[in-house]
Image: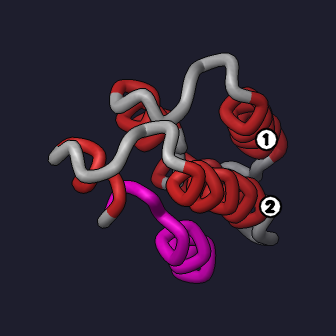
Amino acid sequence: MARAIAAISHSDPLIKLLHQVRLGRMKPTDAGLRAITESWLAAYEKALATDGLTRSCLRRLDPTPRLAVLIDAGVLTNEHPGVTSLNAVYDRAIALAASE
C-alpha cells in the first residue's frame, strides 16, 4: 500500500501545479501541466496494479476525488482517454481484488 501511494504522490499535479492554475499563474491547458498530468495518470494505473492490494486498500486509492478536482479545474475532462482508462483499471482492480 505504501509503495502504491508513493508512486502516485511522486508525480501528483494537485500538490503544487493546481495551485498555480488557481492563482492564474498557469493555464489548465499548459503543455507542462498536461505532460505531468499524463505521467501521473500512467503512474496511478501502474500503482493500482500493485500485487497484493485488497479491496480495502484499493478503496483508499480511489482516483475519483483527485480526478474530480482536476476536471473541475479544467485540466482534464471526463472524456479524456487517461481518465476513462484509469477509471476502468480501478473498477477492474476492485472487482478482482481479494476481500480482507
The N terminus is located in which quarter? bottom right
Give the dominant element type of the magenta stretch: helix, strand or loop. Answer: helix
- Tell me if mark 1 has few (under 14), some (14-19) or many (20+) residues whose alpha carbon lies within 10 angstroms of its own: some
Asked if residue 72 lies left or right of residue 39, the reply is: left
Q: Quadrant of the C terminus?
A: bottom right
The percent position of residue 6, horizontal first and vertical second, equals 52, 79
Between 12 and 36, the one lying in front of the other is 36
* Label of residue 89 in the image: 1
**Residue 68 x, y percent position in the rendering:** 42, 30
Give the colour scheme of this rendering. secondary structure
Q: Secondary structure at mark 2?
A: loop
Q: Residues within 10 Å of mark 2 (few under 14, many from 20)?
A: some
Work out how far the residue at label 2 is from the one at label 1, CA to CA, in angstroms: 8 Å
Query: Position of 99 compared to 50: left or right?
Result: left
Name the amino acid, label 1.
Val
State which region is magenta.
1-15
Q: Earlier in the sequence, mark 2 or mark 1?
A: 2
Q: Is residue 38 left or right of residue 66?
A: right
* Above or below 71: residue 12: below
Residue type beneath disc 2: Ala
What residue sits 55% from the left and 59% below the top?
A: 32
Q: Which mark is residue 49?
A: 2
Is disc 2 in contact with disc 1, using a CB cutoff of under 8 Å? yes
Residue drawn at x 21%, y 43% is 24
Image: 77 above or below 47: above
